[in-house]
Image (cartoon, rainbow, N blue to C red):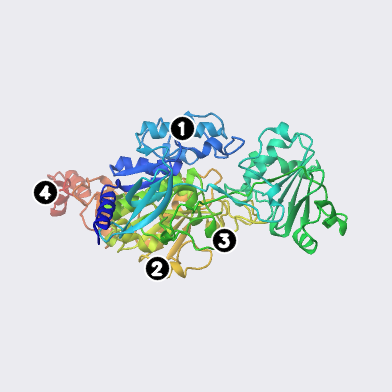
Amino acid sequence: MGPLGLLLALAMHLAVCTRPHRDYCVLGAGPAGLQMAALLQRAGRDYEVFERESAPGSFFTRYPRHRKLISINKRHTGKANAEFNLRHDWNSLLSDDPRLLFRHYSKAYFPDASDMVHYLGDFAKCLGLRVLYNTNITHVTLDKDPQAWNGHYFILTDQNGQAYQCSVLLVATGLSVPKLVDFPGSEHVEGYESVSVDPEDFVGQNVLILGRGNSAFETAENILGVTNFVHMLSRSRVRLSWATHYVGDVRAINNGLLDTYQLKSLDGLLESDLEYLALVKDSKGKLHITLKFLLEENNSSQSADSIPLPQDENDNFAMRVAYDRVIRCLGWKFDFSIFNQSLRLSSGTEFSKKYPLIRASYESKGSRGLFILGTASHSVDYRKSAGGFIHGFRYTVRAVHRLLEHRHHGIAWPSTEHPITQLTSSIIRRVNEASGLYQMFSVLADIILLKENATAFEYLEEFPMQMLAQLETLTGRTARHGLFVINMEYGKNFSGPEKDVFYYDRSVAHIEDAWRSNFLHPVIYFYRHLPTEQDMRFRPAQWPLPRPVAVHHIVEDFLTDWTAPVGHILPLRRFLENCLDTDLRSFYAESCFLFTLTRQRLPPFCQQGYLKMQGVSSTKSLRQHGVESRLLQDYTTMEDSNLWLGDQPSAPGPLTQSLDSNKEEL
């Protein structure tokens, strides 16, 4: 190698050595990125957030276009429990500062998007989060290094060519690339991201909207009052969130077009696959819908007025009218363009063209140490739970942070340990207040790890239940003596025609049929051993977990309040007792003393309380029981008899002496 080559190699070496390094790099200062930053900050970790705009939450400066969020801001629940109230607060991020609750930023039930921008800015500022603004990461690649945490470093390059190195990459960029249509004439289609939001621009026009999600209905809602009519076209039927329980489906705030359609006011919904269509523009600038094969059968270079349209053969073709505007509202997909192929984020399938390929732990399937957070992680629970939205992914981000704390810093998953006598009350408390279980149903679950002889248990909160087989590796906790998994689920028939929440054959009150409950309700699984990877892979169809030793459904409750003594708590306690083959009730000292006289195995309450030097005092009823069981003589009767005969009271017998002198020890 010549002198020039040596200088070049030295320069490259110095550039690598002086490259800024962070243990954790977070891409994006939206809600998910800020949530992870807050957790890293509190843990005292070395991290940096990279944001291409000049402030956090830039997505909400542009979207939704008509500024009304569909995330609920329920400020009042009638309860003071902060954890419970988060169940109905869909906008706040998790922090220890009560000032950083979204209810302080808006009074509206469906807030304005600008309020979210304000909130996220304060969140980052008040917590002192480390964010590099105006830093647009344009390329991400790998640098192999056996000394790195994950066998490689992630190299991030910004718009100025500055490179950054990090051990763990946390991608929170959301879904930012509009989904486009690809058919003849699609150049005449306007996009949701750029179409005018001024209703005056649509006065007296015929409008066709492509798509059937919230953005499509939001756009229609804005112009219903000024257009001749609005038609909506999609390949699938409209899905309403009240029927599907999926927050991403059409919400009530946007569904005005359904009313105008069903009430015969010219607006309407149509179904067709967009790939079969074509769009032609006539000499007057009007847009006509035709079929692609008709366009292909004729010379596409002909004038639009000479191209045959479906109504030439079918005079009641639904879209035979001409449109003034066609608007695309087909949603978004992940931006893969900045990631080098070596990261293997996509497999090329249709689904993975929208979302990166990730595991149930939110780690990339292609690159260890790369995690996807926020909306882009929704592939784990797509159309099932709330992981694509703030009120869901704030908990999945926290789960990822806990996994990282154990993997890289040796800090086991947070847990609390309790005596077995508190098992029922611990479960009841969590299912009645926990927000993460409630919002990330069938995704995050509480895990109860039993100690030897079921004398105590360890309680872990909000673990990704599809990773159950790897629980010991991911958490640093052991599951040697059996476990319970507490999950929230809808019923098997909770979604679909005649199988929605109002399904007539569901169980709403009958305890013995609680498994038929169709509304959200707690489900407890019991395993004697931790399920294996094979168990998880070959679990029964439609089961979120492998078949357990026993399973218990707590019957659905209209108030989502599972505290009824007979309807909820008693069946749960009996289920737990059957699993553990013990008695979980609480007893008085007298009852515990009686058990010592009549049973070989005592209830845990008595073992852990009154027989551990906490004392059982002598009482009249205890003495009476001793006499009736012939363990004690009836000295009271003898004493009365002797006094009647004029004799002195007899000296106490040995059992009486023992009971009196040692009652403090007992």
Q: Is residue 234 left or right of residue 267?
A: left
> Badge 3 local density, few (<14 within 10 Å), some, or many (20+)?
few
Q: Label 3, label 1: how many angstroms apart (C-alpha)? A: 35 Å
Tell me the amino acid under the disc marked 1.
Tyr
User: Could you say whether the residue bearing mark 2 is in a helix, strand or loop?
Assistant: helix
> Badge 4 local density, few (<14 within 10 Å), some, or many (20+)?
few
- Where is residue 502? Give x, y as percent: 64, 51
- Where is residue 213? Give x, y as percent: 63, 48
**Residue 410 visible in the displayed image:** no
Q: Label 3, label 4: how many angstroms apart (C-alpha)? A: 92 Å
- Residue at point 74% right, 36% down? 202
Tell me the amino acid under the disc marked 3.
Glu
Residue wearing tag 2: 533
Tell me the amino acid under the disc marked 4.
Ala
Residue wearing tag 3: 350
In this rendering, the answer to whether 651 lies above or below 631 is above
- Where is residue 52? Give x, y as percent: 44, 40
N-term-proximal mark, 1 vs 4 = 1
> Badge 1 local density, few (<14 within 10 Å), some, or many (20+)?
many
